[in-house]
Image (tube, rainbow, N blue to C red):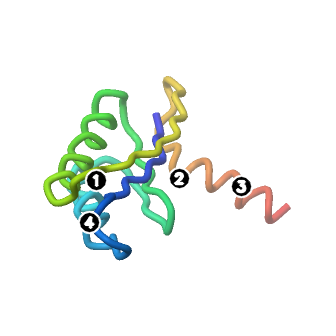
Amino acid sequence: MIVAFSITPLGVGEGVGEYVADAVRVVRESGLPNHTDAMFTSIEGDWDEVMGVIKRAVDAVAVRAPRVSVVLKADIRPGVTDGLASKVATIERHLRD
């Protein structure tokens, strides 16, 4: 599965980059394939692995924030691996055609 998610600390002021970095650090340390952009972090693995990492990322932010908001979108497709790279490669191939 691939999950695109966003963790936002609430009640900490306007600048949240350092809090978001705490969450992204957890994701990167997980060893699962991942990608972070300006709006979301995507992570790929099996259900329990991915959801466990997301929970740990939320917990890392919750240590310093009084409230945490989470938005996620999941693509659950058994048997597919390397979806983070292969989906983008497919789009790039179509753009070249």
- Residue drawn where x is 48% and y is 66% of the image: 37
- Residue drawn where x is 61% and y is 48% of the image: 87
* First in residue order: circle 2 vs circle 1: 1
Q: Residues within 10 Å of mark 4 (few under 14, many from 20)?
A: many
- Please tell me whether mark 4 or mark 3 is closer to you in this view: 4
* First in residue order: circle 4 vs circle 1: 4
48 shown above or below 55: above
Which label was assigned to residue 91?
3
- Residue drawn where x is 18% and y is 53% of the image: 60
Q: Which residue is mark 1?
A: 27
Residue 52 x, y percent position in the rendering = 25, 35
Q: Amino acid at mark 4?
A: Tyr
Q: Which residue is mark 4?
A: 19
Q: Amino acid at mark 3?
A: Ile
Q: Residues within 10 Å of mark 1 (few under 14, many from 20)?
A: many
Single out the residue that lies furthest toward the left.
63
